Image: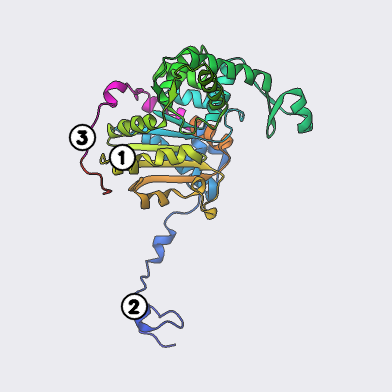
Amino acid sequence: MKTNKNSEPSPKNSSPSHSSNIHFAPRGDALKNPVNHFDVAKIRSVSDALDAFNSTSFQSRLLGRCYRIWLQMLNDPERPLIFFGLSGAMIAGGMRRVIRDLIAFHAIDVLVSTGANLSHDLYESLGGRHYMAHRHIADPTLREMRLDRVYDTYADDVKFTETDEFVENFAESLEPRSYSSRELFQLMGERVKDEHGILATAAREKLPVFCPALADSSIGMALTVYRNERRKQSRAPMIYDPMVDNLEIMNLKRRYAKSGVVFIGGGTPKNYIQQVVPMAEIAGLPVSPHSYAIQVTTDDAKWGGLSGCELPESQSWGKLHPNAEQCTVHVDATIGLPLLFTGVMEHYEEWKSRRGLKVDWGEVMQPMSVRSGKRV
């Protein structure tokens, strides 16, 4: 085929009009950043390894990028509000102390969790433990022994029953009025004396804990028993009102021009944090989309579920800023989360001036002027 020496040859079987729209980037643009092979001799810390991962490939590169984005959030001079979405059996999986330290060191500002994680945390605060299952015992036999199994981990069902009784007695002590899950967990955490507990530490630090699917947990079941007993006695109960949760988290977001999200898994916590932006929008109280987002998950986008969806998808809904720093790594969170947080903590001197939230919830819940009820 003859070609003009000053022009690129047309792709085979393409028409001149079609090929004229093809942009050929300089070949050098694609070859500017070589992969650097992981050099163990240069690694002296977890953060060294995570930094090195930024020049490798596949999930290691994504893990390294998540680490850099989290550090960027923590060092941002505009102090973004950092939401942390927690799903999966992370307490049974040995991640309780990691999550407690995230709160204590102010690496996150708002915890949105499944009820199961909070139930298992409370169970440990009241003396329960999780145990490694070293040998196989048939599950029907475990039932007879009153042992509950989570994959390769056992929990004591007798101690869970005691935890349920604690929740029922706690609810019985409350004034019969409406409560958000955030207020319930603040009050509950204040009753628990546990240096290493998630709820106890969040209460001390005044860090808000939201549980949008509270009914779907052991705590929710105990509250159901309490509610039923009150009903039988014709006594007014305390009431968990999830719509108050919505108002609190939406109005809290309005007080921060910038925000970031860290998702461990997906589920309800992920959706709840993401929906804050469109919820405020349809309420006529628009807020800024999230400026940062990282996600540690084993869920897959191709099934169409929100837990596995890629973060850019949320840009179509207005939940994530078009120019947001964002990354998803597909790795077991019991591996990814402790590595990321260890790396972040190795740079604690850089961001330790970051203080916890000081929230006056009475002021937060003051009615705000509505601009428009339409989506923008």
Quarter of the image for residue 117 reads: top right
* Foreground residue among 47 and 282: 282
Whichever of labels 2 and 3 marks the residue nearer the N terminus, that label is 2
Q: Which residue is depicted at the point 42% across and 17% down?
A: 176
Residue 263 visible here? no
Q: Which residue is depicted at the point 34% across and 41% down?
A: 279
Which label was assigned to residue 280?
1
Instruction: Check if mark 2's residue and mark 3's residue have beta carbons within 8 Å.
Output: no
Q: Which residue is depicted at the point 37% across and 41% down?
A: 292
Whether the magenta-drawn stretch holds residue 353 is answered as yes
Q: Is disc 2 surrounded by few (<14), some (14 to 19) or many (20+) residues within 10 Å?
A: few
Q: Is disc 1 surrounded by few (<14), some (14 to 19) or many (20+) residues within 10 Å?
A: many
Disc 3 marks a residue whose amino acid type is: Ser
Q: Bounds of the magenta span?
A: 343-370
Please provide percent x and percent y for residue 217.
56, 29
Q: Tag 2, which secondary structure?
A: loop
Question: What is the distance, in whole Å, between disc 3 and disc 1 at their CAs?
Answer: 12 Å
Read off the residue under disc 2.
20
Disc 1 marks a residue whose amino acid type is: Ala
Please provide percent x and percent y for residue 358.
32, 21
Whichever of labels 2 and 1 marks the residue nearer the N terminus, that label is 2
Disc 2 marks a residue whose amino acid type is: Ser
Question: What is the distance, in whole Å, between disc 2 and disc 1 at their CAs?
Answer: 46 Å
Q: Is disc 3 surrounded by few (<14), some (14 to 19) or many (20+) residues within 10 Å?
A: few
Question: What is the distance, in whole Å, between disc 2 and disc 3 at their CAs?
Answer: 53 Å
Whichever of labels 3 and 1 marks the residue nearer the N terminus, that label is 1
Which label was assigned to residue 369?
3
